[in-house]
Image (spheres, grey):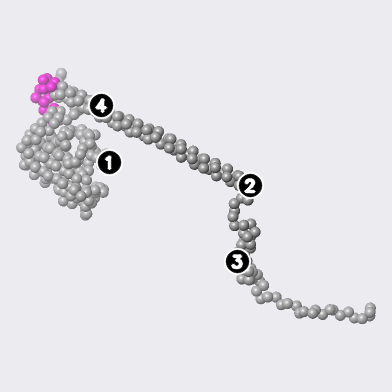
């Protein structure tokens, strides 16, 4: 046996050739094993555990019941507290409203007292001026607006546009940066008043408020203030001047044309009429803070 040559055993089956798609094992696995296997396994697990996820043991059921009771108790307590606090909140709100209204009424009363005292001081000042002042003093009081005046002049009424729509084209508001809403602005009244002064007005008032050299026309939101007092449209301007000639001079001026453009292009309602006699009230007393009389000679002032 030792001298016999050993032969290699022959294989009963030939060696398998490698698959051509062996390098794409991931894709091959996805194609051969679909997702249905995963769904089948999940269904089998549900069958073993059961469809219901409710706790099965007594301890778990008791814990769930206690949690539900606590949640219901919290909701109930919150609703009860909201119902209890609602009347208190409403009461505090009503008290706050009443305090605001009371404070507003008190402020109106104080403002009325201030106006009465101011009027009394103005009357005393005018009486003292008439009693002790000379002709030059009376003229100064007349020009400064310290006394009521009357004479021929103009009545000019300016009001907002009826539809308050925007105008088209170039106009004074567009060039001045205004976004037109059809409403009269503080700059509009400023230009009209300056135009009246330039046309020869000797005294001007707006809605019964006398203008002086220190008067200011400003805006606060949509409201127009004259010397910090709000005005309500329509705005009635009275100006004392030389009658018909005064009217023509104003309407032919640049500011008169500005008012005409507001009427034509923006719908502002305006009317102007010559008056035989207009009466303007006295302005509030002026307080001099800077101006001082100039001495022109020994013991005399000018």
Answer with left or right where residue 226 lies relative to residue 242. Answer: right
Q: Quadrant of the C terminus?
A: top left
Rate crowding at label 4 as few (under 14), some (14 to 19) or many (20 or more) other CA atoms within 10 Å: few
User: Going by the picture, which residue comes out furthest to the top?
Assistant: 299
Rate crowding at label 3 as few (under 14), some (14 to 19) or many (20 or more) other CA atoms within 10 Å: few
Distance Cα–Cα, label 3 vs label 2: 38 Å
Q: Which residue is mark 4?
A: 110
User: Relative to the observer, which residue lies in front, 173 or 93?
Assistant: 93
Front tag of 1 and 3: 3
Q: Which residue is mark 1?
A: 221
Mark sitting earlier along the chain (4/2): 2
Answer with left or right where residue 9 lies relative to residue 126. Answer: right
Q: Which residue is mark 3?
A: 35
Answer with left or right where residue 95 lies relative to residue 58. Answer: left
**Magenta-colored stretch includes residue 141:** yes
Front tag of 3 and 4: 3
**Image quadrant assignment for residue 129:** top left
- 197 versus 300 height, above or below: below
Mark sitting earlier along the chain (3/4): 3
Which residue corresponds to the image point at 94% horizontal and 79% vertical from the top-left? Answer: 1
Mark sitting earlier along the chain (2/1): 2
**Image quadrant assignment for residue 188:** top left
Disc 3 and disc 4 in contact, CB within 8 angstroms: no
**Magenta-colored stretch includes residue 274:** no
Which residue corresponds to the image point at 25% horizontal and 26% vertical from the top-left? Answer: 110
**Whether residue 216 is visible:** no
Distance Cα–Cα, label 2 vs label 1: 72 Å
The x, y position of residue 67, in whole percent, is 57, 44
Q: Circle 4 sits in a helix, a strand or a loop, which is it? A: helix
Disc 3 and disc 2 in contact, CB within 8 angstroms: no
């Amino acid at each position: 046996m030792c001298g016999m040559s050993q032969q290699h055993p022959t294989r009963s089956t030939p060696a398998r050739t490698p698959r051509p798609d062996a390098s794409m094992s991931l894709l091959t696995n996805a194609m051969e094993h679909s997702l249905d296997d995963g769904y089948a396994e999940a269904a089998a697990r549900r069958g073993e555990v059961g469809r219901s996820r409710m706790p099965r043991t007594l301890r778990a059921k008791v814990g769930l019941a206690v949690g539900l009771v606590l949640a219901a108790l919290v909701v109930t307590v919150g609703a009860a507290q909201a119902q209890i606090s609602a009347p208190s909140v409403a009461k505090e709100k009503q008290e706050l409203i009443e305090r605001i209204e009371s404070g507003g009424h008190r402020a109106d009363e104080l403002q009325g007292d201030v106006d009465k005292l101011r009027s009394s001081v103005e009357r005393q000042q005018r009486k003292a001026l008439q009693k002790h002042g000379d002709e030059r003093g009376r003229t100064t009081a007349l020009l400064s607006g310290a006394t009521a005046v009357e004479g021929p002049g103009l009545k000019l009424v300016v009001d907002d546009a009826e539809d308050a729509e925007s105008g088209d084209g170039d106009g004074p508001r567009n060039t001045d940066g205004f976004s037109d809403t059809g409403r009269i602005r503080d700059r509009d009244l400023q230009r009209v008043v300056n135009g009246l002064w330039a046309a020869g007005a000797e005294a001007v008032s707006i809605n019964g408020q006398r203008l002086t050299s220190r008067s200011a026309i400003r805006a606060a939101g949509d409201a127009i203030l004259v010397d910090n007092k709000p005005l309500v449209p329509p705005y009635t301007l009275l100006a004392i001047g030389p009658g018909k000639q005064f009217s023509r001079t104003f309407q032919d001026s640049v500011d008169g044309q500005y008012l005409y453009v507001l009427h034509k292009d923006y719908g502002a309602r305006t009317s102007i009429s010559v008056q035989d006699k207009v009466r303007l009230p006295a302005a509030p007393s002026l307080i001099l803070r800077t101006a001082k009389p100039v001495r022109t000679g020994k013991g005399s002032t000018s």
